[in-house]
Image (cartoon, rainbow, N blue to C red):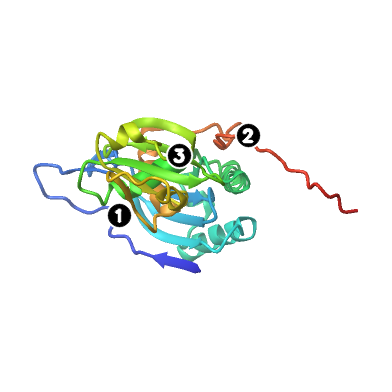
Amino acid sequence: MLVARFKSSESNNPKIEVESVPTFSIFNFQFSIFNCIMALILNIDTSTDVCSVAIARDGNLIALKENDEGFNHSTLLGVYVDDLLKENDLTANDLDAVAVSMGPGSYTGLRIGVSLAKGICFGAGKPLIAVSTLAALANAVAQREGEEFFYCPMIDARRMEVYTAIYDREGNVVRDIHAEVIEENSFADLLSARKVLFFGNGSDKVKEVLKHPNAVFINGVSTSAANMIGLAQQQFEIGKFEDVAYFEPFYLKDFVATVPKRKVL
């Protein structure tokens, strides 16, 4: 399915006539309307089978294009970036930064996304922002849930293994990013303390194994460049940028090339 969603932004310089300044919280992302640094950021996520590109202005989505039909990233990504920039009358020089999903995830997918992001940064002289794939997923779910849960995003790592981490609602890391082989007693200590929300493309197979009453599974949560926007804006504001020349994706596990048993001449 090919999806292209566009949302017009409001005035870039709204006049605020209030005495107290409201503060918003987005997954440990605290900012006020007076200290938010204006930024136009291109967000790229190719960490899974979803190829996704978004443009955000000042932390608000203005354009999104993504495809979830499989690993066509090498064909689609460059086209999506060009299309979104042209459709919004922008060039790479207009950007303030480029944000890329850093992993963990698909080895090939991550390399494609990071390579293009670094190329744009080199060519246009823009800073590079790296956003954790799992933190972005957790951020998307935490924004819409009102209760105190543990948030457990999962990315499929084949067989019964997933890439995962545990966050609380404020975005604090409860359990760091790791590869987990799912068993009946996985996450038993956390499940005994409170409800744990499991989501992401690795959670479907986990549902068949974890039967604890505090295990809650949310369907339909997938990686998307739109999920990166709040975290990318936060990192832009504090000046947390990567070295464009030396940055590498966070693969978590080393890539292992397989050799077919039967050689074909």
Left or right: 263 with respect to 93?
A: right
Q: Which mark is residue 12?
A: 1
Whole-number angstrom distance, CA of label 1 to CA of label 3 = 50 Å
Where 103 falls versus 203 (above or below)?
above
- Tell me the amino acid under the disc marked 2: Asp
Residue 237 in view, yes or no: no
Q: Earlier in the sequence, mark 1 or mark 3?
A: 1
Whole-number angstrom distance, CA of label 1 to CA of label 2 = 44 Å
Left or right: 176 with respect to 25?
A: right
Question: Which residue is labeled 3 in the image?
Answer: 183
For mark 1, does the 10 Å Cα neighbourhood hold few (<14), some (14 to 19), or many (20 or more) residues? few
Q: Mark 2: which secondary structure?
A: loop
Q: Residue at x 50, y 69 (%)?
A: 1
Whole-number angstrom distance, CA of label 2 to CA of label 3 = 23 Å
Q: Nearer the viewer, residue 176 or 234?
A: 176
Question: Which residue is labeled 2 in the image?
Answer: 254
Q: Which mark is residue 108?
A: none
Q: Position of residue 120 (x, y in %)?
A: 58, 47
Q: Earlier in the sequence, mark 2 or mark 3?
A: 3
For mark 2, does the 10 Å Cα neighbourhood hold few (<14), some (14 to 19), or many (20 or more) residues? few
Q: Position of residue 92 (x, y in %)?
A: 53, 51
Q: Residue at x 31, y 34 (%)?
A: 190
